[in-house]
Image (cartoon, rainbow, N blue to C red):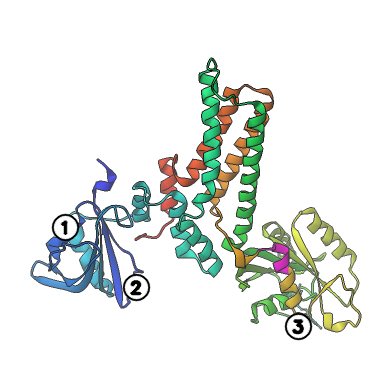
């Protein structure tokens, strides 16, 4: 039996008291079942009906009800949305009434997965519903909306067309070598086309890498010797007295974290224990933790005291940072204590909250034009598949140098299928379950 035959129901607004709560039903018999409980006949789709939901003779609530006839609905099936008064008791009573009539409670993401199965949306759009719900910055919202509206999926169309065309031509060449009027697919053509497609995929991947900063934020570790002002800088950036500041070196032991939005870019800041040769076991543990933050950081702010020379220990720390191959900025704090400045250095005063130059430097380091965001494949699933498609194309291009057409076409086909998988056109069922299980109930 088709799993979609059964009508499902769920509250689609938060499970909290509010003015209105909305309950959604989706499935073939949702109209028939609703009419058992609704005080009026529902004869027109997309029309708001005001009436009562009744359990026998007893009224449960006055509601406004809209019927969407499939396929012109979110899921592609018949859908009914009931807006009742926002008491969870009322919502529960209505839902129980429908469940007693054979309707099943929807699972997480089940409305969206039905929309996907009925071809209303592709998998990129389905994932975007979730990221749109979770968006907290305008930039995250914008990227999610591009995907939901299908703009992001369109990025793949020219690639799929080109790859499909090349594959079809190769197949004809292999299958019908005797026909002279068939255009021959030369090694040169395969090489040129693969190169072009690899370039496009690399650009998509590069854009996708950068979108991670917008979607997931940037991890920034504040590191340096004790007493250089790391905790003061954290407080200045957060505009809050979060970390303890003192003139005693070794004040911070455990790391202290905080989040800010810098011109729409989410920053996750980690203030760490000052790094030095320490005897105190607690301080040593703190220092070990500081060193671990290096690995998670997208950017390391290496703080120095502008009023003193770089110490041997700091020089060692700097080479350690360089070894990690991470983005880093040398930040000279306590600018207020010096009189002459080197124009190539970045000076701040955490104490005086004189940190604008640092903010500018951080934005420059990531070079994200947040005002000109464009559609991007940003989820980890999409990024993984993009990478796989690119690797397969690289293999096809390399195989083309030594191997026969039929072997080259194997990797090319793999790349083609992988791109289709991004859209959900050749996806396996478990993967979809994995995607939709991250959704909230009611979506
Ligand atoms: N003059 C001046 N003093 C500062 C500045 N920033 C911090 N300080 C002082 O430097 C001392 C140490 O500051 P913290 O922020 O605790 O330094 P830290 O790097 O977190 O130190 P540890 O936690 O011990 O590693 C405090 O007395 C601060 O007031 C600054 O810009 N100018
Ligand atoms: Mg500190």
Say which residue label 2 marks. Answer: 16
Left or right of 48 on screen, residue 432: right
Q: Quadrant of residue 265?
A: bottom right
Query: Quick one: 244 or 101, which is closer to the camera?
Result: 101
- Where is ligand 1, by quadrant? bottom right
Secondary structure beneath label 2: loop
Residue at image point 21% right, 72% down:
63
Residue 381's x, y, as percent? 52, 49
Q: Is residue 237 magenta?
A: no
Residue 132's x, y, as percent? 47, 63
Say which residue label 3 marks. Answer: 351
Left or right of 146 on screen, residue 367: right
Q: Quadrant of residue 44?
A: bottom left
Residue 289 visible, this orientation = no
Mark 2 Cα-neighbour bin, 10 Å: few <14, some 14–19, many ≥20 = few
Left or right of 140 on screen, residue 236: right
Is 308 placed above or below 183 here? below
Where the C terminus falls, by quadrant?
bottom left
Residue at image point 44% right, 55% down:
438
Q: Quadrant of residue 50?
A: bottom left
- Give the mark nearer the N terminus: 3 vs 1: 1
Residue at image point 74% right, 78% down:
355
Mark 3 or 1: the one toward you: 1
Q: CA distance from mark 3 to mark 1?
A: 67 Å
Indicate yes or no: mark 3 CB to ligand 1 under 8 Å.
yes
Is 89 placed above or below 42 here? below
Question: Which numbered tag is attached to residue 33?
Answer: 1
Residue 329's x, y, as percent? 78, 65
Q: CA distance from mark 3 to mark 2?
A: 44 Å
Secondary structure beneath label 1: helix
Secondary structure beneath label 3: loop
């Amino acid at each position: 039996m088709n799993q979609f035959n059964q009508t499902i129901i769920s509250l689609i607004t938060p499970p909290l008291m509010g003015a209105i709560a909305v309950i959604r039903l989706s499935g073939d018999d949702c109209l028939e079942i609703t009419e058992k409980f609704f005080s009026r006949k529902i004869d027109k789709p997309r029309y708001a009906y005001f009436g009562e939901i009744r359990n026998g003779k007893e009224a449960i609530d006055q509601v406004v009800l809209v019927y969407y006839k499939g396929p012109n609905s979110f899921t592609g099936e018949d859908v009914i949305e009931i807006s009742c008064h926002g008491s969870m008791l009322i919502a529960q009573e209505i839902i129980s009434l429908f469940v007693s009539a054979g309707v099943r409670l929807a699972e997480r993401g089940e409305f969206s997965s039905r929309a996907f199965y009925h071809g209303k949306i592709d998998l990129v759009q389905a994932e975007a519903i979730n990221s749109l719900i979770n968006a907290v910055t305008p930039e995250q919202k914008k990227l999610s909306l591009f995907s939901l509206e299908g703009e992001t999926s369109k990025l793949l169309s020219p690639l799929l067309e080109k790859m499909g065309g090349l594959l079809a031509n190769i197949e004809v060449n292999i299958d019908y070598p005797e026909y002279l009027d068939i255009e021959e697919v030369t090694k040169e053509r395969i090489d040129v086309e693969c190169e072009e497609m690899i370039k496009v995929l690399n650009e998509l991947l590069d854009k996708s890498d950068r979108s991670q900063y917008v979607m997931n934020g940037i991890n920034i570790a504040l590191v340096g010797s004790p007493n250089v002002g790391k905790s003061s800088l954290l407080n200045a950036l957060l505009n809050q007295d979060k970390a303890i500041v003192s003139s005693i070196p070794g004040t911070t032991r455990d790391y202290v974290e905080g989040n800010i939005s810098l011109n729409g870019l989410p920053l996750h800041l980690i203030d760490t224990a000052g790094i030095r040769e320490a005897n105190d076991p607690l301080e040593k543990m703190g220092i070990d933790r500081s060193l671990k933050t290096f690995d998670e950081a997208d950017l390391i702010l290496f703080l120095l005291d502008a009023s003193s020379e770089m110490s041997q220990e700091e020089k060692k720390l700097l080479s350690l940072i360089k070894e990690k191959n991470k983005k880093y900025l040398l930040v000279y704090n306590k600018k207020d204590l010096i009189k002459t400045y080197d124009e190539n250095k970045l000076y701040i005063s955490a104490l005086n909250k004189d940190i604008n130059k640092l903010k500018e430097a951080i934005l420059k380091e990531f070079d994200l034009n947040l005002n000109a965001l464009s559609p991007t494949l940003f989820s980890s699933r999409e990024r993984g598949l993009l990478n796989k498609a690119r690797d397969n194309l690289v293999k096809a291009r390399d195989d083309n140098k030594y191997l026969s057409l039929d072997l080259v076409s194997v990797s090319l086909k793999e790349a083609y299928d992988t791109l289709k998988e991004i859209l959900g056109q050749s996806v396996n069922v478990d993967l979809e379950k994995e995607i939709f299980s991250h959704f909230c109930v009611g979506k």
